[in-house]
Image: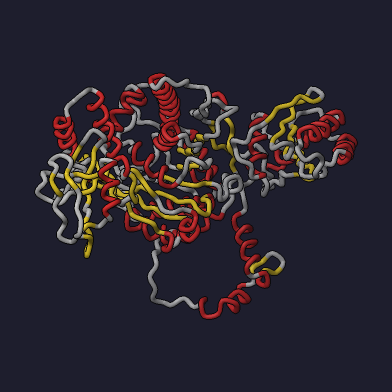
């Protein structure tokens, strides 16, 4: 029976260095000798491309080599399930994870490799006031537990520190490196940033994702002025957009299309006023008033209205066009003026436009033009300028949470827009945010799914950062940022469902029947040390180590704790549906139609093995195909080699040969 708890190895996350060697082996098999890379042979194969010129353009900083190595290290942690803090634990496909995102990224490498369609992050901007994660390269997991276990206030990265920019780069580099592994081949990442580190972020993203995969630098204009500047008030931030593989993204879609920002508001205003019986002149006046605001000024060319909607007019002429006919203006019964360049359409086509009331005649002193309604042209190629009134989100959260819990929440509309660009309603896309803060990304995923019927799901990761002692959040009983974020998700989900129901009732439809149920739940996991005791070979700890080798599962851990660590080790998604069965009085976990069966009970008997064999035959859709994997707790056999041997024989009779223990 194979054991999967080899102390210093299997109690850790994916071995990324070994995976890199395997990838190299696929390309250059001759350079791998007994598991080692023959760099001389590799240099011979690469020829002149191995000579690095002394003078070249690249970004270097104090600690870069360590930061690169940190991305390759394996985590000694695990993710412990917290059903009591979750919502719809058994059915939801959303995840909320509390912990250091560097360790969490390492733990998710197997389960979510190349499965994430979009990443959005809003990392610390390195303003001198926000904190920067203080990684400890010798033992980051131990460092995390010490920092969070003592309710310590996280330190800030001040300009007086001699490694001000280096500290920030050392924090960002390994996290971005690991996040790239999780992106699907047609996946994209959006990264918010401001002026403090925008130049450095661009350089490390070019290095990690490749310059050829750069898509855009989006300018995010808000309505708040940062007055710390003595000369120019700063009202913009940025978002870098990179593809995992531009060539694949470029061939998989026809292009990113988006609603013109604000168009839906203009259309809604028109319809609302029309329904109230307001005259067209008054509707036109109110729409023009809307255009006077910066958010809507770019739509001002749609400056006309009729009974159908809001429209602009387009030229009906072309060079060397038709000049031997014209049409009659139905309002004056006179011939329309022929354009100087001639008509751009045939006579029959102009008559068809007239029949459909698609021609605007003006005052009759100029050639007529074609109507172009906003409803038909509201989607466009997304531009790199986005205006978002951040006061709206601030007020929305105050209403939702009953107080000002977050000073600078991200724009819900902006993140919704990013998600709608990068994903479609027909895919079960995973949206990942590992600096999730106020959980705007989770809120945006739920809201967008409600609006367009999509099935997107999210993974949010947030460090359990303490709230300031004198803050409104602490006074309201929220001790950490995740506590507020989880409550926001609960309340936002409930509000979205209520709005969805009210809309359905207004439209005369049935709310629940025939409609896909919106997933507003989330599974909570918390980063902790592995459930499996690691071997400690120092003389002072030998007695404890020997005891732990016999009873290798930590005593304060539950069966479910260990179960999810097994899922992580085997690369299974944390939202995998788990079926519970009782066999010979023991709980047996089965998932994936029998592809994995786990029993972590004590005092195992051969009756359990017989029951597992029968269960596999019942649930496997293809019958006995040899693809079942069974895992037991090693101490569950109570040291009985006889029970263990007989268990293996019984399972083999049922076609199960892949058996392991922890």
Taking 486 as reference, is 14 left or right? right
Quadrant where the N terminus sits is top right
Judge by depth and name the residue closer to the eye, 341 or 172: 341
Residue 346: horizontal and vertical position, in percent? Answer: 28, 55
Is 205 placed above or below 572 here? Answer: below
Please indicate whether residue 182 sits to the left or right of residue 238 in the image. right
Is residue 160 visible in the rendered image? The answer is no
Seen from the viewer's position, the closer of residues 419 and 285 is 285
Residue 239 visible: yes
Q: Which residue is depicted at the point 24% across and 32% down?
A: 270
Q: Quadrant of residue 490?
A: top left
Provide residue 463's location: percent of width, then percent of height: 45, 38
User: Where's the C terminus, which quadrant?
Assistant: top right
The residue at 30%/46% (across/down) is 352
Seen from this angle, which residue lies furthest left?
365
Q: Name which residue lies at 21% across and 23% down.
A: 277
Residue pictured at 14% horizontal, 49% vertical: 335
Quadrant position of residue 215: bottom left
300 or 623: nearer the viewer? 300
- Horizontal relation, residue 372 to residue 138: left or right: left
Picture coordinates of residue 161, whole percent (x, y): 33, 52
Across and down, in percent, residue 297 comes to: 19, 43
């Amino acid at each position: 029976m194979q054991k999967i708890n080899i102390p210093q190895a299997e109690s850790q996350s994916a071995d990324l260095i070994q995976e890199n060697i395997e990838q190299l082996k696929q390309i250059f098999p001759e350079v791998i000798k007994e598991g080692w890379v023959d760099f001389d042979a590799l240099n011979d194969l690469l020829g002149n491309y191995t000579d690095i010129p002394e003078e070249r353009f690249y970004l270097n900083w104090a600690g870069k080599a360590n930061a690169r190595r940190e991305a390759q290290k394996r985590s000694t942690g695990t993710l412990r399930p917290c059903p009591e803090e979750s919502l719809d634990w058994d059915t939801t496909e959303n995840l909320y994870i509390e912990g250091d995102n560097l360790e969490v990224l390492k733990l998710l490498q197997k389960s979510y490799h190349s499965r994430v369609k979009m990443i959005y992050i809003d990392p610390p901007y390195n303003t001198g006031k926000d904190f920067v994660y203080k990684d400890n390269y010798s033992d980051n997991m131990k460092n995390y537990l010490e920092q969070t276990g003592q309710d310590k206030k996280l330190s800030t990265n001040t300009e007086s520190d001699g490694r001000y920019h280096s500290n920030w780069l050392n924090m960002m580099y390994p996290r971005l490196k690991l996040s790239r592994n999780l992106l699907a081949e047609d996946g994209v990442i959006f990264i918010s940033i401001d002026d403090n580190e925008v130049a450095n972020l661009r350089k490390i993203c070019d290095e990690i994702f490749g310059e050829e995969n750069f898509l855009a630098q989006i300018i995010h204009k808000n309505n708040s002025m940062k007055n710390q500047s003595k000369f120019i008030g700063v009202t913009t931030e940025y978002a870098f957009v990179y593809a995992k593989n531009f060539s694949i993204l470029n061939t998989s879609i026809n292009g990113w299309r988006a609603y013109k920002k604000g168009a839906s508001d203009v259309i809604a205003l028109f319809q609302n006023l029309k329904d109230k019986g307001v005259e067209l002149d008054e509707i036109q006046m109110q729409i023009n008033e809307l255009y006077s605001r910066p958010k809507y000024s770019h739509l001002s060319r749609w400056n006309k209205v009729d009974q159908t909607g809001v429209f602009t007019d387009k030229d009906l002429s072309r060079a060397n066009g038709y000049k031997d006919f014209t049409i009659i203006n139905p309002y004056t019964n006179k011939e329309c003026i022929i354009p100087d360049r001639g008509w751009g359409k045939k006579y029959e086509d102009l008559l068809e436009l007239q029949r459909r009331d698609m021609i605007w005649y003006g005052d009759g002193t100029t050639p007529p033009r074609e109507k172009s309604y906003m409803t038909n042209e509201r989607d466009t190629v997304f531009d790199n300028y986005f205006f978002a009134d951040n006061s709206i989100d601030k007020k929305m959260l105050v209403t939702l949470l009953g107080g000002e819990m977050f000073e600078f929440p991200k724009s819900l509309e902006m993140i919704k827009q990013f998600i709608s660009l990068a994903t479609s309603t027909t895919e079960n896309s995973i949206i990942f945010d590992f600096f999730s803060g106020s959980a705007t990304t989770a809120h945006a995923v739920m809201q967008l799914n409600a609006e367009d019927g999509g099935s997107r799901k999210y993974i949010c990761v947030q460090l359990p950062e303490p709230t300031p002692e004198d803050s409104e959040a602490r006074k309201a009983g929220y001790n950490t940022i995740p506590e507020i974020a989880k409550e926001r998700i609960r309340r936002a989900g409930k509000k979205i469902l209520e709005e969805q129901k009210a809309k359905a009732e207004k439209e005369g439809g049935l709310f629940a029947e025939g409609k896909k149920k919106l997933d507003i739940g989330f599974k909570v996991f918390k980063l902790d040390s592995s459930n499996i005791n690691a071997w400690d070979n120092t003389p002072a700890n030998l007695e404890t180590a020997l005891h732990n080798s016999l009873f290798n599962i930590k005593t304060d851990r539950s069966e479910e704790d260990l179960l999810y660590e097994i899922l992580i080790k085997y690369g299974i998604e944390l939202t995998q549906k788990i079926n519970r069965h009782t066999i010979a009085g023991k709980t047996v976990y089965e998932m994936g139609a029998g592809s994995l069966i786990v029993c972590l009970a004590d005092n195992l008997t051969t009756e359990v093995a017989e029951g597992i064999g029968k269960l596999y035959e019942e649930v496997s859709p293809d019958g006995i195909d040899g693809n079942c994997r069974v895992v037991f707790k090693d101490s569950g056999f109570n040291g009985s080699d006889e029970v263990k041997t007989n268990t293996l024989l019984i399972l083999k009779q049922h076609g199960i040969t892949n058996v392991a223990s922890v």
